[in-house]
Amino acid sequence: MSDKPNIVLLVADQLNARHVGAYGNSRVHTPSIDALADRGARFATAYCQSPLCMPSRSSFNTGVYPHACGVLHNPVTLDERFPTIAEVLSDSGYATAGFGHLGGDGLERGFDTKVDLVDPPVRDAYLAEQRAVHARGSGHSAVFCGPHPLPEEQVQDSVATELAVDLLQSVTEPFYLQLSFMDPHIPLLVPQRFIDLYDGAEIELPPSRRDELADKPANVAGTRRATLAEKAGDAAMKAAIRHYHASVSYVDELVGRVVGALEDRGLLDDTIVVFTADHGDYAGEFGLVGKTGNFYDCLTKVPLIVAGPGVLPGTVIGDIVGLVDLAPTLYSLCGCRSPAVVQGADRSRSIAGEPMAHPAGRRSSRWAFAATRGHRGPLEDALATDQVWPEETLKPLPTDPYSSGPVSHVYDGVMVRSERYKLSVYGDGSRELYDLEADPWERNNLHASPAHQGIVTELLTGLLQWQIESWPTETPQSPLPYHYRATSADLIPEQFRDAHAAWREAAGVQDP
């Protein structure tokens, strides 16, 4: 047996933390994930660093924020200057393997064995599913769901899991395995037996299901129109949520298969098992299914569970953390040195049951941050004009059950989550402030509230401090521009405004 722990990283796609038993949802059947939480540590307040796939995966695979590693949208190739977990562990003597929806575009680096969406048999399973889905047709449906068109053993996630389990029968220690599921990503097509788990079950609609969206960024209402979710009745939305629950239960069983394979080989006690998601999903919130490039908790708050050596069983960690912290935490648990580019914080003390130390004055170690960038030309082009969607672009989309809506119309945006509040600021000028203690469903936007302007200024200042701490100093770049258009921008401390001006000058960017 090696003196280094094995590592298994299990990643769901678009898993809203509200739909996991261990995170308080007694209606969703997730016994395997719940058992993992019981024998490990559960981070109660974990955030991804982007609500989009590639930026989030690039961030947690490198320990570097999306704006710092240059991946702020889908698809952008991860630069080789930013080593992945697989690369670091491979260089440290680990056998490495990755299966399923790894992300591609640089995220496949470092694996000795790799079978993802471009490799058979996972590719073949994915294409077979797409052919079957499109043959069914769906028209413009916001809630496309139903039994999976293929036998369960031919479903992509089943195929990828089988490859992982087969590898665990013979792999030598130490090893790093990443298994990345496509579910519960839309379309919500699930093997029938998981749908049957919820036959007759009471399905609750989120309280924000029919909220007016006047105080939300325009892309939220735009997506509701473009996907025809606006016209979906309660029965259709409940059917979608039922199938979402079924998809989560399907992933849960696959997690159990991997844990069982480790146990069968006597490896479980020597293996760190991590379960998380790249980002969340609407499951009826604001009347939507799928995702947008916004920062609501349903999209950015993710499950994060760590079990195995060095972890105190049954630990619940209330500190706010980011998935950017995952890589340095794993390196610490393995005795590996983090690459110099890593920006996340080592949370190994927390999962061992010890209090987390925070450097004085460093908000970034106590708060969570996220960012997106609009899918268009260079950032310099976006600085000159606000992004406002012409109404004609919000027409119903072509038949594509795999699309969440006009997510290509993502705004430039940043988010900061403090102990109580969340502030989101977008390149079109829209802003959102929510008191998550009083308003966990983010229904009451307090950004314009006179009583909360001190909070707004504090969070804006924190956003700029985060940028100063996290921006790569060796490569002058255009900064994230969003909060400097604020009417309260003159309240930001002078040294932060000076640093921002220096960045703009170095990048040759003119103020609009």
Image (spheres, rainbow, N blue to C red):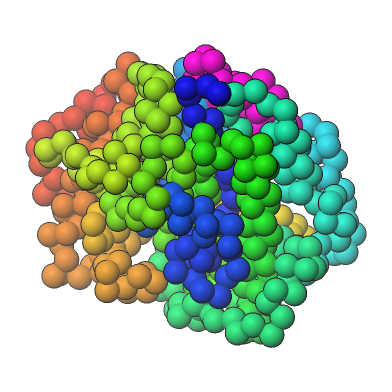
Is 399 on the left-hand or right-hand side of 291? right
Q: Is residue 395 visible?
A: no
Q: Give the mark count.
A: 0
The quadrant in which the N terminus is found is top right
- The front one of 211 and 297 is 297
- Among the 4 quarters of the image, the one containing residue 336: top left
Q: Position of residue 25 (x, y in %)?
A: 49, 71
Residue 397, relative to residue 126: is it above or below? below
Q: Which residues are magenta?
A: 86-115
- The front one of 331 and 394 is 331
Residue 475, relative to residue 99: is it above or below? above
Q: Position of residue 38 (x, y in %)?
A: 45, 56
- The front one of 349 and 1 is 1
Q: Position of residue 27 (x, y in %)?
A: 55, 75
Q: Is residue 113 magenta?
A: yes
Q: Is residue 329 magenta?
A: no
Q: Residue at x 51, y 48 (%)?
A: 276
Q: Residue at x 68, y 77 (%)?
A: 198
